[in-house]
Every structure is written in C-alpha cells, then in structure tokens.
Amino acid sequence: MSKLFKNYTHSYFAYLQIEKNNSVHTVKSYRDDLEHFFMFMDEQQIADLTDVTHQTARLYLTRLHEKKMARASVSRKISAIRGFYRFLMREQVVEENPFLLVHRPKGTKKLPSFFYEEEIRELFETVEGPDLLSIRNRALLEILYGTGIRVSECAGLALTDLDAHLGILLVHGKGGKERYVPYGSFAAEAVENYVQNSRAMLMKKLDHNKLFVNFRGAPITTGGIRHILNGLIQKASLSGKIHPHMLRHTFATHMLNNGADMRTVQELLGHASLSSTQMYTHITKEHLQHTYRNHHPRA
C-alpha cells in the first residue's frame, strides 16, 4: 500500500483501538475499506486526501454500484471513509468532509431467525445425558438462551464473572463495555452441575479461569460454541444450521412476547441504541397476529 495510506491511517487506527476501543475485527474492516478507497485515489491520480472533493466521493459511490456491490457493503465503505475524514478534520488535516453529504444506500433488513418454544424444548432434550459433555452443553445452552448474551461474550466468561448468590453475570461486551445480566434458576442449576461435576474433569491438569471449556479442557472458542450448537441441531432433527446469534434472537423474542418492555431487553442485550432492539418488534407483531387469528372469533 502507498506511503500516503500509511502516513494518514497509522494514527487513525491507533485512535480507533485506544480512544474508541474498537475490536480488532472492526479495525480490520475499516482498514480494508480505506485501502479500497486509496486504490481508487491511485486510479484517479489523486495525490492527496485534501484533493478529494464531493464530486470525487460521488464518483467513488458510482464505481461501487457499477461493481454490483451489495448495498450493505457500499453503505459500510461510505460510513468508514466518512468517519476517517471526521477524524482528519479533528486533527486539522483537512478542512471539510467530502463524504458528509454522500447518500448511503439503505440495506434490506432481514428479520432475525429464532426458535419457537416447542423447538427450544426439543433442543434442550438433546443435552439431558449424564456424560461430561452433555452436562457442559446443558449449561452452555441454558446460559445462551437464559441471558441472550453474544456467543463471543459467552466464550469470554470467567468463573469470577458469576455471582451465584444473586444469579447475575458480569458480561464483557463489545467495545470493552461491561453489563450485568441476570440468569434464572434453570441456568443456575445447570451451571452449578457443570462446575461441580464436569468442568474440572474435562480440564484435567490444565489451569485457567474460563467458565466454558472444550473437550480437551482448554477455554472454548466462539467457533467451538458454533460447532456444538450445530451438533445439537442435527441431534434434535431441527431443520437448517443454527446461526451464532439465534439463541440471542430467541431470548429477545420470547422476552418481548411475554410482556417485557423494550428498554429492559435493550439493556439485557447490551445494545447501544434502542433501534437495534426494535427489529424484534416485527417478529412480536407476527406473533400477535398469529395469536389473534387463532383465538378471535371474528379473525
């Protein structure tokens, strides 16, 4: 990549990691998007970022559409470059943001997939065995469904993050944000059984404080959790593969269907914005319509 790219982006990536506390994955996505834009600048023989105009930004947007790039990808790239220029303005490198008024295409939002209550019961039936892995899988399933935490947050849980007396988890979320999430009696019983009768035996001579471990006793990874969940899906004879966030979506949907308010669900999920939680209202509306059609004499 050009010297121009390295000169301008080194401090920006440091800003994202240190000040914004963005994850490594997020920073990599920003890097990829900015590299793509700098390549475009080279093609257009634009020597410096201060030479980029609103017309340049419009031309770049046109190029993305010509490549038949997905709307979500186009929107992400424009957002990344806009944020980069916002940083450059703060550092007084440029005087204006040429991407400020560029229209970001709205992506088509897909409704999140979730399990119906009958499917959840069927899924839990697959982890009723007395063997070490079934005991672990039961605890894993109870925590994911009972708290709605992300798979990555589940993998990162330590023994010290559990307060068994209060039934509360300390969850280390995205961007270094922490939150407390309660868990119910089913999860409490499953986790206690796992810690007392499975975890130490799986770990053998290994020594670490992570709550969930793989069959070798090492800390479980997000990929490992996905593998376990897909195995349970096959065992339960449910259709399709499980999405990493499917139990999280199920948690939110079932909470709202049973009368929980939106703000509470937002806090439990760790959503920074209420708009992220509002996508579940589409599902709950379908649930209300289904219930109405089945139970109202004039439906």
Image (cartoon, helix red, strand yellow):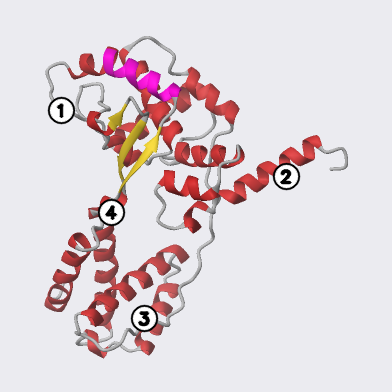
Vertical placement of residue 106 versus 291, above or below: below
- Camera-near label (3 vs 1) is 1
Question: At label 2, which amino acid type do we have?
Answer: Gln
Q: Is residue 193 located in the magenta-colored stretch of the structure? A: yes
Q: Which residue is mark 1?
A: 208
Q: Are marks 1 and 4 in contact (CB under 8 Å)?
A: no
Q: Residue 170: image x %, image y %?
A: 30, 38
Q: Secondary structure at mark 1?
A: loop
Left or right: 35 with respect to 66? left
**Rendered view: 255 above or below 166:** below
Amino acid type at mark 4 = Gly
Residue 175: assigned label? 4
Sequence-first disc among 4 and 2: 4
The Cα–Cα distance between marks 4 and 3, rounded to whole angstroms, is 25 Å
The residue drawn where x is 49% and y is 37% is 251
Q: Residue furthest right?
A: 298
Q: Which residue is mark 2?
A: 289
